[in-house]
Image (cartoon, rainbow, N blue to C red):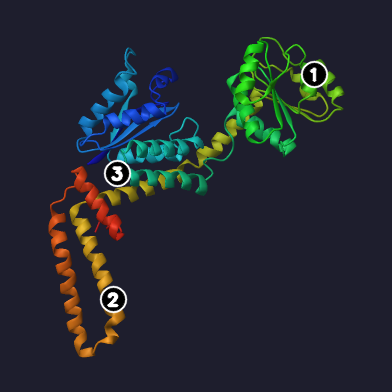
Amino acid sequence: MDLVVTGLSHKTAQLALRERAVFDRDEAIDMLQRLKSDASPQLLLLSTCNRTEIYAVASDVVATGQALRRAVFDERLAGVEDADKSLYTLHGEAAVAHFYRVASGLDSLVVGEQQILGQVKHAFQLSERAQTVGSLLHRLANGAFRVGKRARGETHIGHGAVSVASIGVELAERIFHDFSGKRALLIGAGENGRLCAQHLLARNVASLTVTNRTPEKAEKLAADLGGDTAPFDNLVAAIVAADIVISTTGAKGTVLDARIVREAMRARDQSALIIIDIAVPRDVAPDVDGLPNVFLFDIDALNEIARRNVQLREKEIPKVEKIVDAEVQNFMRWWGSLDAGPVIRDLHAHFEAVRESEVSRNSKRFLEADRGELDAFSRTLVRKLLMGVTQRIKGYRKEDPVELERLAGLRAAFGLQESDLDE
């Protein structure tokens, strides 16, 4: 048995193609159950906005890789010219390394992003629900979780916000420190504005108001976010009632100019106001930044911070790669140790260690003249206890899924450490 993965990602496919290959929770479970077979008993389907990948434990990785392409992708990508060129297939150690790079954030669209580890855990939970998890997949997933945790705990790969939405909120946090009691106003219904508002709500902003030229859009977004609406034709009043303004209309003309903001500031007794302009073209006139107690951050400022943070993350890549390499080798040592020979050797070594410990601990209870006989008797006892088990294990092949589980079960049952395969 070996590991094989086939899929597509942001590196090989445009968004329009990736969207067609997304599986929701129920679809993923159904696909896993339909694909499960004696030839491929262990399966994991990882589906996000940036990748869809199916991992399988199989005896024939070439045939299984082709079968997975047909089953998972052919129907969803039907009619797309050269769709097959967007798919990749890896097996063995390369598949393990790929999975660990994904979990670490190295293979993400934004290096070091936090969400991918949670998505990997969710994919594993779906495999458990579909009953497509065995010893190899369980070990592989635990290694991936460990890689993700180490990458974020031992390096700075996840430090520094890199999305416009999260950077805008972090800058606002530097000024207000605490969002409780602060009121947010969202002008427009753009996706970045929605994300920015979600970040604010996650930090316990007191209230959120949405305004838009199209009232129906404002009402829908406000309902989605749990906020209120305000009329677009009275922005002064809306700003007076806010501490943080997020503007994301992208209108051709200026939405907020110095006159509007100055009037609002007078009505709010010049208390601090943060304006985050993430629209292109800009919604807010540049001279607004010169008003007292008004802090304006536009898309260029946010992108510059994002660029610097990405550079900082990229410096951490070699450290994360070392973690990935170490964990890949740990997995491959364990995988190699499931051959019958290493299992037999480690099982005998385990019993011999127990025998030696017990003989040493109890030797004082015997006459010195009898201790040699005790040692010989205990060796014979251990050998005979293991004789039948050894004979059966010798015939096991890890290419057989049932026998693979038995070999892995023996290691787990006796707590056997993996052999040094280079010896």
Looking at the image, residue 190 lies above or below residue 110: above
- Circle 1 Cα neighbour tier, 10 Å, few/some/many (<14 / 14–19 / ≥20): some
Query: Residue tagged by mark 2?
Result: 358
Residue 52 in view: yes
| Mark 3 vs mark 1, CA separation in Å | 61 Å
Residue 159 placement: quadrant: top right
Task: Name the kind of residue labelled 2 in the image.
Answer: Glu
Instruction: Please tell me which residue is depicted at 22% across the width and 47% down the height of the picture.
Output: 404
Instruction: Please tell me which residue is depicted at 50% across the width and 49% down the height of the picture.
Output: 154
Question: Horizontal placement of 281 versus 52: left or right?
Answer: right
Query: Residue tagged by mark 3?
Result: 134
Name the one closer to the observer, 125 or 136: 125
Please tell me whether mark 1 sits on a helix, a strand or a loop. Answer: helix
Query: Circles 3 and 1: CB distance less than 8 Å?
Result: no
Query: Residue tagged by mark 1?
Result: 237
Q: Where is residue 203 in the image (x, y as percent from the top left)?
A: 65, 36
Task: Name the kind of residue labelled 3 in the image.
Answer: Gly
Looking at the image, residue 415 lies above or below residue 219: below
